Amino acid sequence: MSEVVLASGNPGKLAEFRALLAERGLQVLPVRQFADASPEETGASFQANALIKARHAASASGRAALADDSGLEVDFLDGAPGVHSARFAGPNAEDADNNALLLRRLAGVPEGLRGARFRCVLVYLRSPEDADPLICEGVWPGRILEQPRGDGGFGYDPLFLVPELDCSAAQLSAAQKNVLSHRGQALRALLARLGGE
């Protein structure tokens, strides 16, 4: 089985990637097996941050590396929290803190103005020296609910309405989420490109 190092310490992301890549015979190793510290995400875009993380993971492990940078873009907030999604409520924010801040920022905003999307940019490096990384993107449109629903998923999932199913992302099964999500879309695009190499 081939190995790829995932440049994330997020257990939710690790579980999603392991499930999505197992069927392709790829074993996903967490970057923490090779490096204690994470690189500072100084990029102004999801792609820039994903490249920073992928280069760090590939260099630390000497293996192929996969990194995603993803987040929530809310129309009413001019695309915020965007690249700051994980740190929306501060550098050590938990999911509950970020969700609470998002609800405060959108208090009183009518349903028609609560449009949002999850965006994911994936970067795959074949080796630490790879000068031509594969970059794929996925976008999952929805709306922000006025209160959380469901107890699955992670991050902003309890507040993210999936309009076609009239439920939150946190109410989806893992298999449903992998089909619909921004991360699932980006990963399928990446796997299609890897299959063509």
Image: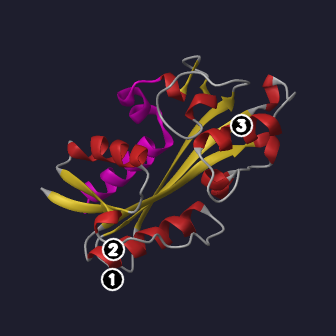
From the viewer's perspective, is the residue at label 2 or at label 3 nearer? 3
Q: In this view, does 169 lie above or below 29?
A: above
The circle on residue 120 is none
* Snapshot quadrant of residue 142: top right
Neighbours of disc 2 within 10 Å: few (<14), some (14-19), many (20+): many
Classify residue 131 as left or right of residue 50: left
What SS does tag 1 mark? loop
At x 41%, y 75%, the residue is: 55
What SS does tag 2 mark? helix
Classify residue 92 as left or right of residue 74: left
Magenta range is 172-197
Q: Residue furthest top?
A: 166
Which residue is tagged 2?
58
At x 38%, y 30%, the residue is: 174
Neighbours of disc 3 within 10 Å: few (<14), some (14-19), many (20+): some
Marks 1 and 2, how far apart in space? Answer: 8 Å
From the viewer's perspective, is the residue at label 1 or at label 2 nearer? 2
At x 26%, y 77%, the residue is: 62
Earlier along the polypeptide chain: callout 1 or callout 2? 2
At x 20%, y 54%, the residue is: 27
Query: Do the numbered discs 1 and 2 sit on residues whose CB atoms are within 8 Å?
Result: no
Earlier along the polypeptide chain: callout 2 or callout 3? 2
- Residue type, label 2: Ala
Q: Residue furthest left?
A: 1
Marks 1 and 3, how far apart in space? Answer: 42 Å
Which residue is tagged 3?
100
